[in-house]
Amino acid sequence: MSQKVLELLKAQFGSKILETSSQFGDDTAVVEPSAWREVAQFLRDDSRCAMNMFTDITAVDYPDRDPRFEVVCHLRSFDKGHRIRMKARIGDEYADGLEIASLVPVWEGANWFERECYDMFGVRFVGHPDLRRILMYEEFKGHPLRKDYPAQQTQPLVQYREGVLDKLAPFGADEGMPFGRQTHDISRNEEAN
Amino acid sequence: MEPLDEELEESALELPSEPMQLNMGPAHPAMHGTVRIVLELSGETITKADVQIGYLHRGFEKMCERGTWTQCFPYVDRLNYVSPMLNNVGFALAVEKMLGVTVPERCQYYRVALGELARICDHLVCNGAMAMELGAFTPFLYCARAREIIWDIFEEETGARVTHSFGRVGGMARPPTAMFKDMVRSGLPRLLFMVGETEKLLLKNRIFLDRLEGVGRVSKETAFALGWTGPTLRSTGAAYDVRRAHPYLVYDRMEFDVPVGSAGDNYDRFMCRQEEIRQSVRILEQVLDQMPDSGPVNIDDPRIVLPPKEEVYTTIEGTIQHFKIVMEGVKVPAGECYSYTEAGNGELGFYLVSDGSGTPYRVRIRPPCFAAVAGLQQLIEGAMIPDVIPTFGSMNMIGGECDH
């Protein structure tokens, strides 16, 4: 369906398009991470692609592969009606170098999607105007959708946080919520005993 | 007598002013769904807004990586709990896309019928709640009455009123009941009557209109860049409906219009949803006429669909099949796919990655209202506090879906 776009990309960027594939009717282009934004800009502005509808951006963790993470972006063109998936592979096995250019300057809708991706995988989007956690809270440790984050993992109890309204805490900072998490948090229970 | 301010300097007369911060939510009575909006105000005008979501985060994507593909259905139910059937069908279609199978025709009609009923539910709740938050309580009750008609049908068909978990890979949990068509046929006129009554109450109401018209305006280009789909995008004049642009199931045989707005304000979003209810009713009438009364609902593939219960109890093949599917799950070919359907709020996408086993490697949902709520900030900046309520209402944020 959008084979033409893949051909266009290959002609335009040459070796920066690492591979292209089509599976289950979806067309995918794997892009060199350094050319991420450049390719996105081209896809949006070139009249033959006209990918003006930003659809989705996310990541997948493959702990066994060498660039461990894949950042996946889905796009659609309103006028042409075609879709494309754009991927870039980044990060080593310790999740170092997990950086890629932000797409917010190209599609402003990428803002929250990139924040979510940062929250869940720790992918840092360079040039993002406001990169902070979105679904999790600030004090959350780790990135839950990574494969090495155990699903049963518990998080430390968060201290009472001074709100923006500077409301006084109804209780002291270290005595909030004496119930709840305790039964799951083994180390904490041991301390108490 | 001297005027009081004669001795005072000019500057001392001005009241001290500094921006005020106001928290709306996470549990605000006029916000359906737990969302927190931090507003910075100058008088009653919003100068800065920060929309904070995540209060309903339940780790849907992580949970899906721990069970079989079929075990995801109860989770997808709870994404958009206002129209769970659309999520069920969307997820089933995504897995079927990877398996390369197509469900029988009767099932396709059945899925369209249930999906459209769920869509009507979704729009009724959104518009009703939006009216209620603006002080019009009666229309909300009318909408709830209308929704009751649909929920009765769902209860009869699936056994559950809200979270049905009715979709299956390769079909549905059960075939349509004998009274399905009659129930829908008799329910639709009553439903349309309720919808009409709601409109009569609202659309000549000056208070309601003044708070919708021209508020929360957005242009087509911005809506595209924000990733908006569904009624929020169509209200700006862009006629993009997945059912029309990329027809799935039997939507290519249906005659229906894609309503679009022109201004992209709250009023257009409201009216788009109202009109879509009518179009869904139109689709439902065609489905009832065309849907075959007999024939299989599930595909005939023992590797995907559970065998009938009698076979499980009486034959060894049936027992083994059942065991394999339940314990190991449906084996989905390795690879990745992005499947998209039109849910109540817009394009509901599932990006699935499989490693060839019975457990999903990655399930990514692309929630339509996530993009809509992301755009809320720029809609309300520069507006007044009361404008936040209808604008937020017309985004139709569904917490479960938005927060994953």
Image (cartoon, coloured by chain):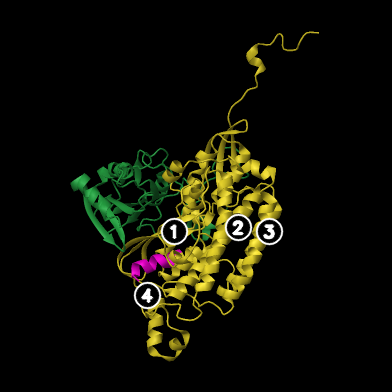
What amino acid is found at the position of numbered circle 2 in the picture? Answer: Leu
**Mark 1 belongs to chain:** B
Instruction: Tell me the CA gap for discs 3 and 4.
Output: 46 Å
Helix, strand or loop at mark 4: helix
**Range of the magenta residues?**
B90-100
Instruction: Tell me the CA gap for discs 1 and 2.
Output: 22 Å
- Give the residue at mark 4: B328
Helix, strand or loop at mark 3: helix
**Which label lies toward us, 3 or 1?**
1
Same chain for the residues under marks 4 and 2 in the image:
yes
Q: Is B366 situated above or below B101?
A: above
**Among the chains, which one is yellow?**
B
Same chain for the residues under marks 3 and 1 in the image:
yes
Instruction: Tell me the CA gap for discs 3 and 1.
Output: 30 Å
At a point 60% along the width and 57% down the height, the residue shown is: B125
Upstream in sequence: badge 2 or badge 3: 2
Upstream in sequence: badge 3 or badge 1: 3
- Give the residue at mark 1: B244
- Give the residue at mark 2: B124
Kindly indicate the quadrant of the structure image that contains residue A39. Answer: top left
What amino acid is found at the position of numbered circle 4 in the picture? Answer: Glu
Instruction: Tell me the CA gap for discs 2 and 3.
Output: 9 Å
